[in-house]
Image: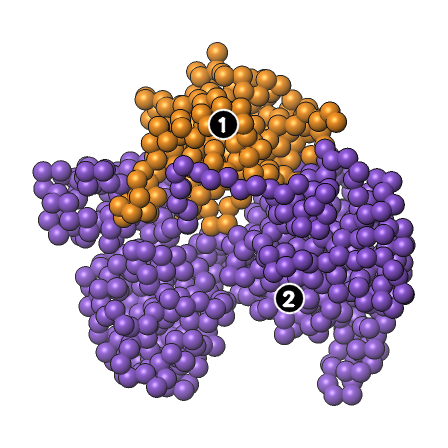
Amino acid sequence: MKSLGEILLRKDETSEIVIGNTALVRAMIEAGTRVVTSYPGSPMPETAEAIRSISKEQRPFYFEFSTNEKVATEIAFGASVNGHLSTVFFKSVGLNVAADSFVQLALMKLKGGMVVVIGDDPGANSSQNEQDNRHYAHLSYIPVFEPSNPQEVYEYYKEAAKLSQEKEMPVILRLSTHVCHAKQKVNFSSYKQQEFDSKPRFSSENENYVPITSKVFPMKRRALKRIKDFKSYSNKSDLNKIIDNGNKDKGIITMGVPYLSLRDVMEDMDNKPDILKLGIIYPLPEDVIMEFLKEHKEVKILEELDNVLEKDIKALAFEENIETEIIGKKDIDDWINEYTPDKVQDVMSKTWPSLFKKINSKNHEKNVENRPAQLCPGCGHRSAFYAIKKALSEEDITVADIGCHTLGFLPPYEMGEVLLSMGHSTSTGTGLSLFNDSRKVVSFLGDSTMFHAGLPGIVNAIFNDHNLTLVIMENGTTAMTGHQNHPGTGSNFNEEVQPIPIKEMLKGFGVKNVYEIDTYAQTKLKEVMEKAVEEDGFSVVIATHPCMLKFTREARSKGAYKDNKVEIDQEVCHQIHECVKEFGCPSFSITEEGKVFVNKDLCIGDGSCIQTCPVDAIGLEQSNGGNK
Amino acid sequence: MANKKRTNIYMIGVGGQGIGLLSEVLIRAADYAELNVRGVDTHGLAQRGGTVQSQLRIGEGIYSPLIQKNSADIVIALERTEALRGIQNYLKEKGTVIYYNTSWQTLDVRLENSEEVSVNDINRAAKKLDAEIIKVYKEDLKETRMQNVVLLGEIVQNNILPEIKRQHYINALQDLMTGDKLDKNIALFKSLVK
């Protein structure tokens, strides 16, 4: 078996099939990165898995999952002003959490250099929006490099790190979902491990790090000058490249994933337009773009999500009196979804219909329903939703947060009817509780998310004495992004630590009514909920059960997994369908005649369903077994 | 214009069926066969029983790992509903679909809002495209988690990817696992590929 850790540390030139997120880690090592921080979020977490493949002793840099993206950014900043090359990585919307500190970075002299790696998510594959983080570059005066495939991820990171160190300024490496997860053979250079010392180099003697009132202006002036100067690098950089198809008429300016899609769509075409592929997307290589515009009669700006490039290039052309026709977005559809080859074909067919064929959609005989993600068999959240739903009345309001439990909004539970962002649920619930004497408000919040951004809302509910019930859906991990530890688990990325006990913490805050109950105790949980929502003020129910996906995986790897299943006694079953339609474990299947059976591929024998059957038709296959 | 030789493989299943391993073995086997490859797994929230897909492109003149609709030479599906989805969305005319004949019912089926996909549904959709259909099921398979390797074996046995040889797959499996797990998977693979 190949060892990823060994490959990532190999001193000689090598090549390996890896995803973009893994290529990134090799680049961090080669570049001499010293401090790396993150908070888990798709599409980035595999980067941490690659880091984990190198033992802590052999790891050439410090890594931690911090409690949220802002904390992670601040740690990377602190390390950088102390002279260490640092990197923080997180998902698209993570930048919103980090923003308060992030927008200050360009004002500072970052002695060691700092690369901010952002995993944007066009197509909203695993996010609550598809925000275009290129806007933040304009807001914060930070250059942006955008690779299109894993080889470029590796090369661009190294270049970004070098520039950041030289110029002592932050640089963004902007990835997107299908750059992070694309797999190909990547060629890695040889490298020499750098000698590091432990000298803290921070000094405020000749450098101001406190932007207050008039002190802000020289710092802002320097930031603006640095970004202006960066243009000359951008103009010369070979990360921007031209695909010259000898077309004097038509050209396309693009980057990243849309570039790859465009190349595929054009591969078998005659009269291919020329392409300018940008690797540095902020600040723009204006000279290169001007020349490209001048050489063509029509230029299409092909960019995913918003019209960031289009606006800048049109402004540039206006100032320079360029007569080239510049074609940007055609309609609202062009702003939405990932620029896959199909999407690019569609966008380009609206631009140059004679060159790009329109895709005809086909009609199908049988409609195949979508299969959205759902709670796993045995998931403690299922028992929680099933029980809590029974404790509430129809008109009560339930608020979701981010995490596996968000999936409770799907049928059959339909719990958690409104969602904004990480940690919003207590405060949104608070707002819903105002001028509301008739409908009870229940907010849900995962344990990891609570530590991430949920605490201020909880403290506020206590501070301002609000009337709602918070259910903490505690599964003992950060489940949705792949089971990372959090402050309540007793381990961080690197070692075992003292866990922060949630119940004691809340009591310490002054929450009067805190209940803690295992979600498999469904009847008890229902009773506790009924009591909690009747209480005046802020009450908390900690609905706890370990993530069963993690639990069974760990049991399997330890050889401790007891293979057990539930079964249905068909003679007892009255086909009430409580198990399949209300409890809704995916292990229950149904025949056309309404007979219920257990899908043995799915059932993990947790037995949480047994209590839901009104006629006791469900039981474990082995009467003495089970891991209940 | 002569098109360069390219093969698009579209894999589809449900989170938890082991599509990740299947796609990783295929991309590595193709690499051992010295073919140019691009791949990608699409898994937003894959662990929770949603549809997962993996795409693999082999050959020259390929850039994106993403396949265009109705242009997959091969659709590999781990389950019937996903097989039908894969055929309807991605399979090209005269392509090949290979699927494991099991069913993980969707929520709509379980709530009796729609009917389960049958072998006939798959046959009808594939015949419309004049596609070859390979239905796979191994009665005596003890570990359902190894259905992916059964499919892999049938891909090789049916010579669906002629440039990739038996040994390339074995090399790929050896890259990815060790110990008991490797022995079990290799033994199963070898029993299927003569």
Residue at 43% across, 30% down: B125
Mark 2: which secondary structure?
Answer: helix
> Circles 2 and 1: CB distance less than 8 Å?
no
Q: Position of residue B41 (x, y in %)?
A: 55, 41
Q: Position of residue A429 (x, y in %)?
A: 39, 76
Q: Amino acid at mark 1?
A: Leu
Q: Which residue is mark 1?
A: B129
Q: Which chain is purple?
A: A
Q: Which residue is mark 2?
A: A73
Residue at 15% across, 49% down: A576
Taking the image as drawn, is residue A597 in sight?
A: no
Using residue A594 as the reference point, say whether residue B104 is left or right of it: right
- In the image, residue A346 above or below residue B191: below
Q: Residues within 10 Å of mark 2 (few under 14, many from 20)?
A: many
Query: Residue A442 falls in which quadrant of the image?
Result: bottom left
Q: Nearer the viewer, mark 2 or mark 1?
A: 1
